[in-house]
Amino acid sequence: ADVAAVAALCNDASIIGNDGTGVDSGAVERIFERTGEPTEAALCILAEKLGGMAKLPDTKDLVPPSTLASANVDSWRMNFPRMATLEFNRDRKSMSVLVDFQKGLDPSSISSQTNHINNDDTEYDGKDSNKDTTRKKKSVAQNRLLVKGAPNMVLDRCTHVKMRDGKVVKLTGSLKRSIEAKITEMAVRPLRCLALAVKDESKLERSLLKFDGIDATAHPLLKDSSKYKDIESGLTLVGIVGIKDPARPEVPASIRECSQAGIRVMMITGDARDTAIAIAKDVNIFEADADPSTLKAFEGREFFLKDEEEQLEILKRDNIVFCRAQPADKQKLVKMLQQLGEIPAMTGDGVNDAPALQQSAIGVAMGTGTSVAKEAADMVLADDNFSTIVSAVEEGRTIYANMQAFICFLISCNIGEICAIFFATLAGFPEPLTAMHLLWINLVTDGPPATALGFNPPSPGMMESPPRPSDEPIMTKWLLTRYILTGLYVGVATIGVFAQHYVQQGITLSELANWSHCGQAWVPPGGAAMCTNLFRESGRMLPQTLSLTTLVCMEMLKALSAVSVNDSLFRVGPQSNKWLLLGVSGPFLLHLLVLYSSRLGLPGLGESFGMVPLTWDDWTTVLLWAAPILLVDEILKAIGRRVNAKSLEHQQQQDLTKDSEVFSP
């Protein structure tokens, strides 16, 4: 019964049952919910399972959830009022309450008569009853101290142990070692262990024994928290509780994905080292077969007692676990990681986590956390799920890659347009594109595909590549080189198809460069009268239409290839982005509509844009000039993948060199 008493009374949490009242109220999402800390809520469940205080019928299905949820805990708290609370302190790692046991039952009698009380037909109300001799008031005892806390700390303050049969024995060295071994065995399972202890009236200070709970701030012992450790001495250990706090099923896979993506995970916990290591192995922070002595797991102040240089070297690589950590340690770790040039993201839910959340590059507050933590954080995790953070990282990388694809498409196309006009002017050729053509390209054929590239799906190996450097520009030197090379081909092809049309008419390139002197310096086949048909007004519409259509086709093909910045079109095809297919087909169909408007009963539409219909031979010429853009882009992508691989290999070699320098004898 002492275990149930400590679990129920040294506790500020509670379990609430939802009955669900009829159809109008709708379905209840959860039958049972907790208020307070999860660990304390687990102790409430333990007290309910132990029972002994509330009379409930044998058929529990007849008891509404609102009654069943906290029947025994409520009875404990009603019959044994709390006189004072010795709040949890991270130095002593325990919390205790002073409880008046004179008004209630003797816990030992509750333990011995549990079944009898549960099966009694009369509900127990905490008062004297002539019908049940086991329910006598205990007139000797008054206040008792109930304690819960970290096993290693509480055990050091215990002098006796209460055995299963109720016998109290002295805590000898061998018995203590046996208990510590059991605690270690439970911790590696892993179970979060708590020690439960009591301090009876025979050892309790006289002023606390008779304390009525009216004004704790005026009590010489209770008003000073530095004396709580002395009060919590001479304890009797009544039990060790192991609480299973399993990670969500998807967490191990998410942390494995983090490792593949070059993201290191550091776990900061208040659990003991053995428990923390076991949990870390379960969720893939540490390898399951790793030797515990070689793992980076630090307990208490162990890490911060090292030299600062050694601390920084430890933080540079590998996943790390910090056990029995204090809130201030989180902020120190964040500052040290930032000092190393890392981008730390910190999660937290308590008031004490707020400084670290604000200090970190990305503060992530739990949805069930305090309002202070939420205000200090940059983002709030509504579902309290670590996997959501990993999904957010993947989404962020996808957005960044799509921005690069967007820029690659627009810049390469714009460079191509500039090159076409520049090279034509430099060579002395007629303008291959008019102002109306350039406006058509930028407003109609560029916009929809570029917008659709923002919906590109994640690349297959996106979460297998390391994070990019924080100071890396979105347009790297290699990407700029790619854009220029692609743009050069676009410009050359646009001029090439234009010049080819005139060459097929029997005009040499030198004559084309001197086109303004046609009929004077040189005469085209057919005589000087052909100059107007070749270079003036409608005579130039066909070659300009060829240039414009070739440019449009190259931009559409370039957009399809830009579905991935580095992956081949054969690995990540355009079919993975349905919006891109729509963004490409829509402008191209619109271009065809204007191109063949004369055949659709709108003869003035095409002429107003300076376009004429193309024959099948013309389309063959267009495709011969436009299609190679895919080959150019594939070659540049392959070179880019090789450049990235060499860069990664070089970085890994540098890291290995640094490691050998640090650990060399």
Image (spheres, grey):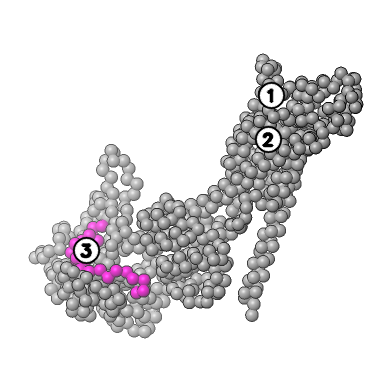
Tag nearer the camera, 3 or 1: 1
- Residue 378 percent across, percent down from the top left: 45, 54
Image position, residue 604 (x, y; %): 68, 17
- Mark 3 or mark 1, earlier in chain: 3
Residue 665 is situated, as x and y percent measured from the top left of the image, at: 64, 80
- Indicate the position of residue 422 as horizontal and vertical percent values: 76, 37
SS class, disc 3: helix
The quarter holding residue 411 reads top right
In terms of secondary structure, where does tag 2 sit? Answer: helix
Question: Which residue does the image show at 24% across and 73% down from the upper left?
Answer: 223
Q: Which residue is mark 2?
A: 556
For mark 2, does the 10 Å Cα neighbourhood hold few (<14), some (14 to 19), or many (20 or more) residues? many
Q: Which mark is residue 76?
A: 3
Q: Give the crowd class for mark 1: few <14, some 14-19, many >=20 residues within 10 Å.
A: some
What is the count of numbered marks?
3
SS category of the residue bearing label 1 = loop
Q: Nearer the viewer, residue 417 or 198?
A: 417
Residue at left offset 48%, top offset 52%: 388
Inter-mark Cα distance, 3 to 1: 88 Å
**Which circle, 3 or 2, is nearer the viewer?**
2
Mark 1–mark 2 Cα distance, whole angstroms, equals 20 Å
Q: Which residue is mark 1?
A: 609
Q: Is residue 356 visible?
A: yes
Q: Which mark is residue 643?
A: none
Question: Earlier along the polypeptide chain: callout 3 or callout 2?
Answer: 3
> What residue range appears in magenta?
70-92
10 within the magenta span: no
Residue sitting at x 61%, y 35%: 447
- In the displayed structure, does residue 11 sit left or right of residue 500? left
Q: Nearer the viewer, residue 84 or 128?
A: 84
Q: Magenta segment: does it hold 91?
A: yes
